[in-house]
């Protein structure tokens, strides 16, 4: 650290002290004698030590500067150029004296002593500040530091989120304080990783007990809310293993965007309300824009997590009719969620997108795969399973498929339905996956073909077996000539490539008859059959 010494004297006489910088490492000397300049320097720069010549600058004037700038002369030693007798009682800020007549070695010794005194005091103050402003367990800034930062307008803190671990007291009581501390450290590390993803544009604080707080500076409201959502999802999906036990962490949050100086209060009110209403996430701010959407996200994330734990993620099977034989010999596996509380089966559009945000999508895919494999293992039907680019881009996914196909002998009857959309960042990954599963004996179909993301050029590079025509085209095919022409073009294209075709959303007799007229190979939709709990469609379709 550079040690800054201010000498208040005229430049001519102060040259007698030029040897100081040669004798002391990391020392900078500034020489001033003007009142306004001295005052300005003390305001703008951190001066560690002052040497003043009372013959050049009166001690009365210097006392005014000390009071004006709140200079801590107990921390920053002040020496006068003079004799011991010049140290007067009324100027108690004087620590010691030096004179031009002193041996250089003695002057250096006095300055070095003052420097050590300053460093000792600085270390002490640093330790005190650390105790005052830092949480000892996590080494994060604490609640007192946040209060101080909120009073600092230059930081521009515009939002807070208080995150509370709901079941922490139970963890402490059952497993003990050591494990409770481990949970807090683990949570801190997890939250820190999310903060790094937004380039540290928020600050994490640790409150007493099990409470953390985020202070937002640069993120937009939506970005900050999304960050909190992902953090909560991450915490709630974590299981900490301790010997033979698994510790499930459950967190809740309150957020405020209040423009008043009451952010801590309003964030805490939102947190308490979220707890009493058994919600995981509540926002307290003047205009509750998008609150319902975020509440819904948290509701479904928690519901989905519980459904996976309780084995309530289930699979339904929709028959696919062969338009030539008028028989059902294949099915599509469709994910559903069984809501025990309301005794109803929930469609995937309620929870599938949220499962991706909550990092539960991979678990759902594996759930559907194993249950479908098990269901069709001893049946003669063919069947298909929907997968996304997110699945394919996961390096472990193909390994999982290979393991499942060794366990269940269904590869010859299995078709992977891949949705081609804007999420596909690398078609080489997709092409490699198709080659790998076909080598295992599976077929591949492109789902929702004919949408804005379908690419005929990419299709020529992919060795697929079937095109499933997008439902938005099929449902309008009777009344909309454009839809009809697009479907007709897709059929001709598929036949030239020797690909099978499936029409989705065959909802009535008119659509079904037109699908057959266009010579589409298969029909799927409620006109044929709604999704079934079991693949047991018995009747021939006439």
Image: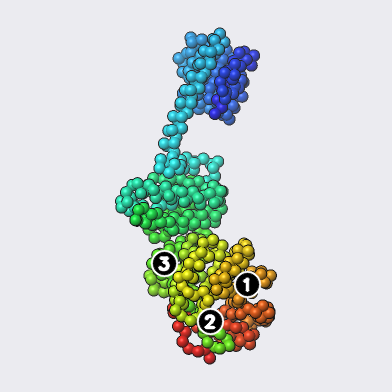
Mark pair 2, 1: CA separation: 22 Å
Residue 490, percent from left and from top: 66, 78
Mark earlier in primary sequence (1, 3)? 3
- What residue did someone put label 3 on? 307
Quarter of the image where one finds residue 473: bottom right
Tell me if label 2 and label 3 are in contact, CB under 8 Å: no
Count of labels shown? 3
- What residue did someone put label 2 on? 320
Q: Is residue 458 above or below residue 376?
A: above
Residue 391, percent from left and from top: 54, 65
Q: Is residue 468 above or below residue 136?
A: below
Mark pair 2, 3: CA separation: 28 Å
Between 119 and 394, the residue placed more toward the observer is 394
Residue 456 visible, this angle: yes
Q: SS of the residue at dot 3?
A: helix
Determine the residue positioned at 53% across, 16% down: 108
Between 326 and 120, the residue placed more toward the observer is 326
Residue 352, percent from left and from top: 50, 67
Between 42 and 65, the residue placed more toward the observer is 42
- What residue did someone put label 1 on? 463
Q: SS of the residue at dot 2?
A: strand
Determine the residue positioned at 59% across, 26% down: 41
Determine the residue positioned at 55% across, 25% down: 3
Residue 226, percent from left and from top: 52, 56
Residue lying furthest bottom: 542
Residue 59 visible, this angle: no
């Amino acid at each position: 650290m550079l040690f800054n010494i201010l000498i208040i004297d005229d430049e001519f006489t102060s040259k007698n002290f030029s040897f100081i910088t040669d004798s002391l490492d990391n020392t900078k000397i500034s020489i001033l004698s003007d009142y306004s300049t001295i005052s300005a320097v003390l305001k703008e720069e951190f001066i560690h030590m002052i040497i003043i010549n009372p013959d050049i600058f009166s001690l009365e004037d210097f006392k005014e500067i000390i009071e004006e700038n709140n200079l801590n002369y107990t921390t920053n030693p002040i020496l006068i150029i003079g004799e011991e007798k010049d140290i007067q009682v009324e100027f108690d800020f004087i620590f010691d004296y030096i004179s031009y007549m002193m041996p250089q070695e003695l002057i250096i010794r006095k300055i070095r002593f003052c420097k050590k005194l300053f460093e000792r005091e600085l270390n002490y103050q640093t330790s005190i500040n650390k105790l005052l402003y830092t949480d000892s367990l996590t080494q994060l800034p604490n609640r007192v530091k946040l209060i101080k930062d909120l009073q600092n307008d230059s930081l521009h803190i515009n939002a807070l989120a208080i995150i509370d671990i709901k079941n922490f007291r139970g963890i402490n009581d059952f497993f003990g304080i050591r494990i409770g501390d481990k949970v807090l450290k683990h949570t801190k590390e997890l939250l820190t990783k999310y903060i790094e993803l937004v380039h540290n544009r928020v600050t994490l604080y640790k409150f007493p007990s099990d409470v953390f707080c985020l202070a937002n500076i640069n993120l937009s409201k939506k970005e900050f809310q999304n960050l909190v959502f992902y953090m909560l999802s991450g915490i709630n999906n974590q299981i900490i293993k301790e010997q033979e036990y698994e510790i499930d962490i459950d967190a809740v949050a309150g957020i405020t965007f209040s423009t008043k100086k009451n952010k801590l209060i309003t964030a805490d009110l939102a947190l308490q309300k979220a707890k009493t209403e058994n919600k995981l996430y509540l926002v307290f701010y003047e205009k509750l824009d998008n609150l319902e959407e975020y509440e819904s996200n948290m509701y479904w994330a928690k519901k989905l997590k519980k459904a996976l734990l309780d084995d309530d993620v289930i699979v339904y099977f929709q028959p696919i009719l062969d338009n030539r034989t008028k028989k059902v010999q294949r099915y599509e596996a469709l994910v559903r969620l069984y809501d025990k509380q309301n005794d109803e089966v929930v469609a995937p559009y309620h929870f599938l997108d949220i499962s991706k945000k909550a990092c539960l999508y991979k678990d759902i895919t594996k759930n559907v795969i194993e249950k479908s494999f098990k269901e069709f293992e001893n049946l003669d039907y063919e069947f298909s399973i929907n997968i996304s680019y997110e699945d394919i881009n996961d390096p472990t996914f193909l390994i999982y498929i290979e393991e499942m196909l060794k366990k269940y002998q269904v590869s010859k009857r299995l078709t992977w339905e891949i949705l081609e959309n804007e999420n596909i960042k690398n078609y080489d990954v997709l092409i490699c996956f198709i080659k790998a599963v076909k080598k295992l004996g599976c077929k591949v179909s492109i789902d929702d073909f004919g949408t804005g993301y379908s690419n005929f050029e990419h299709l020529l590079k992919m060795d697929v077996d079937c095109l499933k025509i997008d439902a938005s085209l099929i449902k309008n095919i009777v009344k909309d000539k454009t839809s009809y022409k697009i479907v007709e073009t897709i059929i001709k294209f598929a036949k030239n490539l020797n690909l099978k075709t499936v029409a989705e959303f065959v909802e009535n007799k008119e659509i079904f008859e037109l699908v057959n007229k266009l010579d589409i190979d298969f029909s799927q939709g409620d006109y044929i059959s709604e999704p079934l709990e079991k693949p047991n469609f018995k009747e021939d379709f006439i």
